[in-house]
Image (cartoon, grey):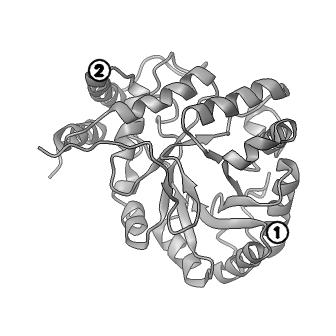
Amino acid sequence: MDIIALSPERRALGKSQLHVSPMAWGMWRFSGDDVTAARQRVEAALAAGINFFDTADIYGPDNDEPFGASELLLGKVFAESPGLRERIVLASKGGIRMGVPYDSSPAYLREAVEASLTRLGVDRIDLWQIHRPDMLAHPADVAATLDALVNEGKIGAIGVSNHTPAQTSALAKHLKSGVVTTQPEFSPLATAPLFDGTLDRAMKHGLGVLAWSPLGQGRLGDGDPRPGRKKDEDARVVAVKAALAAQGANYGVGIAAAAYAWIMAHPAGIIPIVGTQNPGRIGESADAYKVKWTRAEWYAVLVASLGENLP
């Protein structure tokens, strides 16, 4: 019987020179003005073996903070503890403007990257991703701007987020630096990338894949629902949680760790972005490496999500 086992070893990110952990830490909810507490969260991720950090310039308003607040807080952490920057593969995103909503015009892309560099207090962002596609921007113009920023050393590699395979291909056609990563929403509750060509294209072209919201927007977490979230869950969520809980119990881990492991078991080498801001739960993310899968067990989770048997 085939057994899919996971390894915590770092590996190349797509075709880039960057070497990253199999899990990333996301900073959507990285907020507040307590730099010491913020540093402790950063250190908790590093202690869990995570060296890949994913933020964005738009992270802030959802936390009732200004545009760029998450990057600015991380910049304060770097300023207080400069050695941390060298231990991290730093990813950020841009291309969303408040009230616009999307802008990948050459002028704004350059403005966004340079503003992120200033807030973070760094000379270079290792991976910079277009957060969402701007349908009014020609990919040739986008590519020329991003290639120039790479040549200037301001960004190391380029990725896309929330792009369809066709949108990714259109940009890649013009981008001399190459598209290194794609970042879709993917979890045991959001399985579209398995079927819409996103993961197939990534494997065909050697792209790294980052999965945002790997716990199904918090529905697959181990704790109580977020404030305001209904405690009663639909049958599909209950079925998926039951399948993950059963698998996790086999290895003494929780539902969240089993969900991360399910994502990482895919041959595309998907990197789940751990979103918790609780240092203890960040540490528990490493439990995912304890979980092994047979094909039957992995497909059982997918069937629970689809609500019907596979053909």
* Quadrant of the drawing holding the N terminus: top left
Give the residue type at disc 1: Arg
What is the crowding at mark 1: few (fewer than 14 residues within 10 Å), some, or many (at least 20)?
some
Label 2, label 1: how far apart the Cα atoms are: 48 Å
Taking the image as shown, residue 8 lies to the left or right of residue 212, namely left
Q: Position of residue 109 (x, y in %)?
A: 78, 67
Foreground residue, 234 or 156? 156
Residue under numbered circle 1: 110
Taking the image as shown, residue 308 lies to the left or right of residue 30, namely left
Residue 78: which quarter of the image? top right
Q: Position of residue 56 (x, y in %)?
A: 71, 49
Kindly state the secondary structure of the residue where label 1 is placed. helix
Taking the image as shown, residue 85 lies to the left or right of residue 21, namely right
The answer to whether residue 130 is above or below residue 213 is below
* Disc number placed over residue 276 in the picture, else none: none
Which comes sooner in the sequence, label 2 or label 1?
Answer: 1
The answer to whether residue 257 is above or below residue 1 is above
What is the crowding at mark 2: few (fewer than 14 residues within 10 Å), some, or many (at least 20)?
few
Q: Position of residue 283 (x, y in %)?
A: 54, 26
The answer to whether residue 220 is above or below residue 16 is above
Residue 128: which quarter of the image? bottom right
- The residue depicted at 82 percent of the width and 69 percent of the height is 110
Total labels drawn: 2
Residue under numbered circle 2: 249
